[in-house]
Image (cartoon, helix red, strand yellow):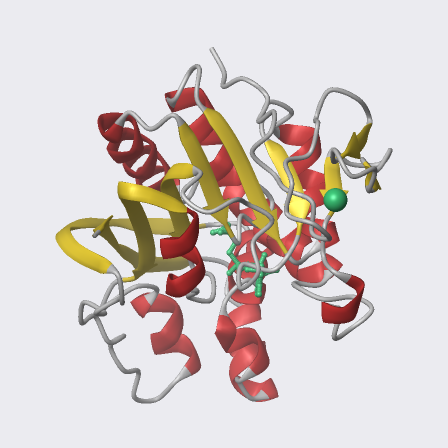
Amino acid sequence: MSCSPADGLLTCPNCGKPLDLGAPTRRCPNGHCFDRTARGGYVHLLRQARRGSADPGDSAAMCQARTRFLEGNWYAPLRDRVAAEAAALAPHDVLDAGCGEGWYTRALCEALPGARVCGVDLSKYALRHAGRTCPSAEFAVASIFELPLADRSVDLVTHLFAPMADREFARVLRPGGHLMTVTPGARHLWGLKAVLYEKPYENPTEVRALGGFTFEREIAVGDTITLTDPRDIEALYQMTPYAWKTGKEAAARLLALPRLETEISFQIHLYRKN
Ligand SMILES: C[S@@+](CC[C@H](N)C(=O)[O-])C[C@H]1O[C@@H](n2cnc3c(N)ncnc32)[C@H](O)[C@@H]1O
Ligand SMILES: [Zn+2]
């Protein structure tokens, strides 16, 4: 079972009217057209004026690393819990904000038959993969700080490891709708950090107060994983922020390991729109 196409959830970035999703070219009632790319099932809705860089969002290499690691199912406990918690909310319209390659979006679609699901990300490389692997959701290149969605148009926003845009999330959520955020737990990737750093620090885990939302509850998800393929160790490293802030020597130490055991831990925070 899978969700139905997200007809009408996405809006025209020029005039804000709903896009007709019936044809390969998306059109708004004012005649603005957006081609659904042939290579991947996504539409480009980032406003020209807002394109700070010609190639915004995560790079092809970062997306490849994340895809390899996630497709290895190492984060399956998190994916399954996110999908189960989403299903318990029984939303009709869902946005996965900063959806990356759509690995979690796909699980949402499977857990929410009949729901309309869309995903937004800045990276076209990520969305190429998302569009191919999750054809029942609608994907758009756009910024989560300027979402191509109407006010009060979704019941659930999922937000995993992406920049926070609480004001935009509050705008697009219906009153009483939910925001589900996922952030690393205190000892997430402790084993990996212990190889990289002499004195690893725990991640901060306080609940963030978000304007327009009431915090409802926290769900902790944790496990220990053992990677025995150096390519998986490298893929995990490349998808973390440590890949761009670690010295060469420490990185080489990690990448020379034949095996890595590490804790994984996540916190799911559920907020309700006021
Ligand atoms: C760490 S990845 C997480 C991807 C996905 N949620 C996952 O957990 O697999 C962060 C994602 O946020 C995207 N991103 C960063 N800034 C963004 C913005 N302003 N608007 C939309 N996406 C953004 C990146 O391109 C990247 O795909
Ligand atoms: Zn328009």
The residue that appears at 74% across and 52% down in the rendered structure is: 124
Instruction: Check the image and report above or below for 110 versus 73.
Output: above
Residue 228 image point, x, y percent: 47, 50
The residue under the point 54% across, 17% down is 4
Image point (27%, 82%), residue name? 201
Say if residue 192 shows up in the picture: yes
Q: Left or right: where does residue 227 sit relative to residue 52?
A: left
Pick out the residue farthest to the top: 1
Q: Pick the residue in front: 220 or 41.
A: 41
- Give percent across and percent down for residue 58: 65, 63
Q: Quadrant of ligand 1?
A: bottom right
Image-quadrant location for residue 182: bottom left
- How many numbered circles does the render carry? 0
x%, y% of residue 102?
56, 40
Residue 156 in percent (x, y) is at 35, 39
Q: Quadrant of residue 73?
A: top left
Residue extending farthest to the front is 30
Q: Residue at x 25, y 34 (%)?
A: 85
**What is the quadrant of residue 129 in the picture?**
top right
Q: Is residue 48 left or right of residue 242?
A: right
Question: Does residue 160 appear anywhere in the picture?
Answer: no
Say left or right for 229 vs 44: left
